[in-house]
């Protein structure tokens, strides 16, 4: 089965974040349970939930901070 590496680790070789890893599900079940490896479909679903298309928030308008009121009696 093919997995996407979410955290760097050493298995039969060194894997960096974002690498693809081909492995038997029984051999990497402990890595999947800890979130080190994910199935490509699960990664796509998680990304869609985090940032669905078209749901970008509109930018917050910049406002000037109100200037402190002048205190009376100071010269």
Image (cartoon, helix red, strand yellow):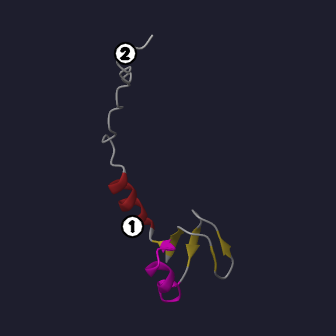
Q: Secondary structure at mark 2?
A: loop
Dot 1 falls on a residue whose secondary structure is helix
Residue shown at the point (35%, 22%) measured from the top left:
66
Q: Horizontal placement of 60 versus 19: left or right?
A: left
- In the image, farthest residue toward the bottom: 26
Spot occupied by residue 23 in the image (x, y as percentages of width and height): 55, 81
Q: Is residue 26 magenta?
A: yes
Mark 2, residues whose alpha carbon is within 10 Å: few (<14), some, or many (≥20)? Answer: few
| 59 or 31, nearer to the observer | 59
Is residue 15 on the magenta stretch?
no
Q: Is residue 71 above or below residue 53?
A: above
For disc 2, the marked residue is: 70
Q: Magenta stretch?
A: 24-37
Q: Is residue 22 above or below residue 16?
A: below
Disc 2 from disc 1: Cα separation: 59 Å
- Picture layout, residue 41 above or below residue 73: below
Q: Position of residue 33 (x, y in %)?
A: 44, 81
**Residue assigned mark 1:** 42
| Outermost residue, top side | 75
Q: Mark 2–mark 1 contact, CB under 8 Å?
A: no
Residue positioned 36% across, 17% down in the render: 71
Q: In the visual, does 20 lie left or right of 33?
A: right
Mark 2 or mark 1, earlier in chain: 1
Please name which of the two marks, 2 or 1, marks the residue nearer to the observer: 2
């Amino acid at each position: 089965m093919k997995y996407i590496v979410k955290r760097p680790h050493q298995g039969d070789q060194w894997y960096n974040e974002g690498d693809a890893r081909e492995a038997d599900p029984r051999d990497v079940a402990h890595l999947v349970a800890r979130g080190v490896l994910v199935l490509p479909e699960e990664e796509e679903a998680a990304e869609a939930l985090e940032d669905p298309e078209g749901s970008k928030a509109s930018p917050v308008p910049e406002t000037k901070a109100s200037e402190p009121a002048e205190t009376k009696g100071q010269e």
